[in-house]
Image (cartoon, rainbow, N blue to C red):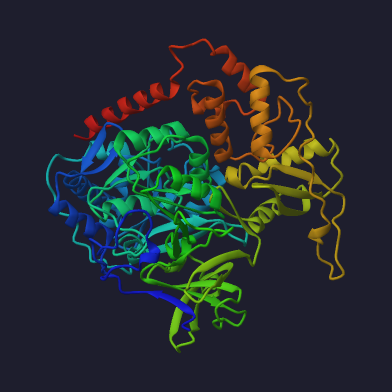
């Protein structure tokens, strides 16, 4: 048996095992050229269909011809600002139409883009910017003051809105910069086990191979692809380039704070046919959206272990839709394998599928030799999706990107994922866990060692240990703190002060939900901290539990207990301090709308993160029937803002 799975020539029909639903096997409509560039393919689309809509955000639309013209003009402006081939250009921008113009312009200038989430703490942003040293950072009004001056001493901040408004109303050819599929397209930062985020450098061919001539999906020219991922999350790579490299329409949602009603409304209003969701968001969609979304043709989900029950329930409601469980780390350009879930799937656990096109997967032992079918080992990936490496981290690149010799005697460059998996005789992969302390929460990759390293930089601590506590499907990060000296103000103020400082260093999804102060850490005979003896806390004990909760308070408390897996939550306890995540709050928002029978502005749920405050807010507006559809009002305001932006670009 060949102990690797190969899918390298996909000009022919894909294997039926990769398909489900009603779509019959067919030839991929677009070919794969490993030397092609993203901007080169988009330019070809603009020649073939200049008047077709490429991007849409509410009422703001851009055709392929307009996208090509505006990005070429902006590329020339970037070059005037000093951008040359091989440079990096930062994007401190939201999910928006202008951001997509900027990405294409950066590539046309021969540079690579580095997306930064404006919601990240200033110190975290400053480190990434210092690490990748962008020539220019494109930003917008309101974001320009996020960064400390020292972070941008050696680069220029440019207001993208002003730059686009100043573009001349002329046609201009794209810059004549020689690039190919092996050149860097973007740098995506992920959590790093050494204590600092690391930049993954992805080439053009990794992205082209992801969405062209594939075996797990066929993009149709009339597809409408949904764009909900933040630009610093690699799911956006599939959304954006899956649409633009196949002549489809990309429909984005501009609001940063998403809600399930808003997402489903956009799907229905725009006849969205293809979308990729995090596993948590997919589960939320299944749990809280009853009617069939008839336009959906292919739905993909990934990022965490999936629920077979949710997949089956979705297929019962959407019997003609293809449903795919996708697997892959950032270092292999979003995806390495895919599994098409069929209506008759009967296993208890969801496989992560077969290798996708232009890639191979390998199961290796500790000596990097391939293992036979049915034996667990480390999952490695080879092929055109591999990253160039880690930016400025040659030692780490050499450690994780290695050359193996296959059972057939081939020398292959591989990425060692750190995931443990097993492959059967037919090449089907099943995920079995991690070899290290990396975890995923709401699809976001978190290295617990990075949190520990950040805590150990706090001068008040002599040591810190971070653990992940899982109760049911809920995961919580817990920090154990050893002070340099006894905390004079007591445990809770000291722990709260340490976590408050950590929030200025790490993104919100990496902040522990609980910190416990210990005078000493238990040690094992080898003189190392015995993590197994660190008792995880019972976080269900409230500061002050609500007594005989009734009405709205009782409804909210019940939902919190269900989602957080905790009991007797205090009315003034903060949702996020209890380990809650944005995805879980979205779930509570959807359930609240169902329970109360009215629309609720999702922003208000985020702005009132405790039971008492949220209940008071909702009760105060219970009779406001005119203002009840807050989501529609916010959408209308967003459409107006985008219409103004479109006029400013003409």
Nearer the observer, 298 or 105? 298
Please state the horizontal and vertical placement of residue 152, each as a whole percent of the image: 45, 47
Residue at 23% across / 61% down in the picture? 29
Residue at 53% across / 46% down in the picture? 280
Quarter of the image that includes the C terminus:
top left
132 vs 454, left or right, is left
Q: Is residue 283 above or below residue 556?
A: below
576 vs 89, left or right, is right
553 vs 294, left or right, is right
Residue projecting furthest to the top: 623
Nearer the observer, 509 or 359? 359
Please state the horizontal and vertical placement of residue 311, each as a whole percent of the image: 49, 50
Nearer the observer, 418 or 301? 301
Q: Is residue 631 above or below residue 313?
A: above
Please state the horizontal and vertical placement of residue 353, each as a whole percent of the image: 47, 64
Query: From where the camera sits, is residue 392 visible?
Result: yes
Residue at 76% across / 39% down in the picture? 539
């Amino acid at each position: 048996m060949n102990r690797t799975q190969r899918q390298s020539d996909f000009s022919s029909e894909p294997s039926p095992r990769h398909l489900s639903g009603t779509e019959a096997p067919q030839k991929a409509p677009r070919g794969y050229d490993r030397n092609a560039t993203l901007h080169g393919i988009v330019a070809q689309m603009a020649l073939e269909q200049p008047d077709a809509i490429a991007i849409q955000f509410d009422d703001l639309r851009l055709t392929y011809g307009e996208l090509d013209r505006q990005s070429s003009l902006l590329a020339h402006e970037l070059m005037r600002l000093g951008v040359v081939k091989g440079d990096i250009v930062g994007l401190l921008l939201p999910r928006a139409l202008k951001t997509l113009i900027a990405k294409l312009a950066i590539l046309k200038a021969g540079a690579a883009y580095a997306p930064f989430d404006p919601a990240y703490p200033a110190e975290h942003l400053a480190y990434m910017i210092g690490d990748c040293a962008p020539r220019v950072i494109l930003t917008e009004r309101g974001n320009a003051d996020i960064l400390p001056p020292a972070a941008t001493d050696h680069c220029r901040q440019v207001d993208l809105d002003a730059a686009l408004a100043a573009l001349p109303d002329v046609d201009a050819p794209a810059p004549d910069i020689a690039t190919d599929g092996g050149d860097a397209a973007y740098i995506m930062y992920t959590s790093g086990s050494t204590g600092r985020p690391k930049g993954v450098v992805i080439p053009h061919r990794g992205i082209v191979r992801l969405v062209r001539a594939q075996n797990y999906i066929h993009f149709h020219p009339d597809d409408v692809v949904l764009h909900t991922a933040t630009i610093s999350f690699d799911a956006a790579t599939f959304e954006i380039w899956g649409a633009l490299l196949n002549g489809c329409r990309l429909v984005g949602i501009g609001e940063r704070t998403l809600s399930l009603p808003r997402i489903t409304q956009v799907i229905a209003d725009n006849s969205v046919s293809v979308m990729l969701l995090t596993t948590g968001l997919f589960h939320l969609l299944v749990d809280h959206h009853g009617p069939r979304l008839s336009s959906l043709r292919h739905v993909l989900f990934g990022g965490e272990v999936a629920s077979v029950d949710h997949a089956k329930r979705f297929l019962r409601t959407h019997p003609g839709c293809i449903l795919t469980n996708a697997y892959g780390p950032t270092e292999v350009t979003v995806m390495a394998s895919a599994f098409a879930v069929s209506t008759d799937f009967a296993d208890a656990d969801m496989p992560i599928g077969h290798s996708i096109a232009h890639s191979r997967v390998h199961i290796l032992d500790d000596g990097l030799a391939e293992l036979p079918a049915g034996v667990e080992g480390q999952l490695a990936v080879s092929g055109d999706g591999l990253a160039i490496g880690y930016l400025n981290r040659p030692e780490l690149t050499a450690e994780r990107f290695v050359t193996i010799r296959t059972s057939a005697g081939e020398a292959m460059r591989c990425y060692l994922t750190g995931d443990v998996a097993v492959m059967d005789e037919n090449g089907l992969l099943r995920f079995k866990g991690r070899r290290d302390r990396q975890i995923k929460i709401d699809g976001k990759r978190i290295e617990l060692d990075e949190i520990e390293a950040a805590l150990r930089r706090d001068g008040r601590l002599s040591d810190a240990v971070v653990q992940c506590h899982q109760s049911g499907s809920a995961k919580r990060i817990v920090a154990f703190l050893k002070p340099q000296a006894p905390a004079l103000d007591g445990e809770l103020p000291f722990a709260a002060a340490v976590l408050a400082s950590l929030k200025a260093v790490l993104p919100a999804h990496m902040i522990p939900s609980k910190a416990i102060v210990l005078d000493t850490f238990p040690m094992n005979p080898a003189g190392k901290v015995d993590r197994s003896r660190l008792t995880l806390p019972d976080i269900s004990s409230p500061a002050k539990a609500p007594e005989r909760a009734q009405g709205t308070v009782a409804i909210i408390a019940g939902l919190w207990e269900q989602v957080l897996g905790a009991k007797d939550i205090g009315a003034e306890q903060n949702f996020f301090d209890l380990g809650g995540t944005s995805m879980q709050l979205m779930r509570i928002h959807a359930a609240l709308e169902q329970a109360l029978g009215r629309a609720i502005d999702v922003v208000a749920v985020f702005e009132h993160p405790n039971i008492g405050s949220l209940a008071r807010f909702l009760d105060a507006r219970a009779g406001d029937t005119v203002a009840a559809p807050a989501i529609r009002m916010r959408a209308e305001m967003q459409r107006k803002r985008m219409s103004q932006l479109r006029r400013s670009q003409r």
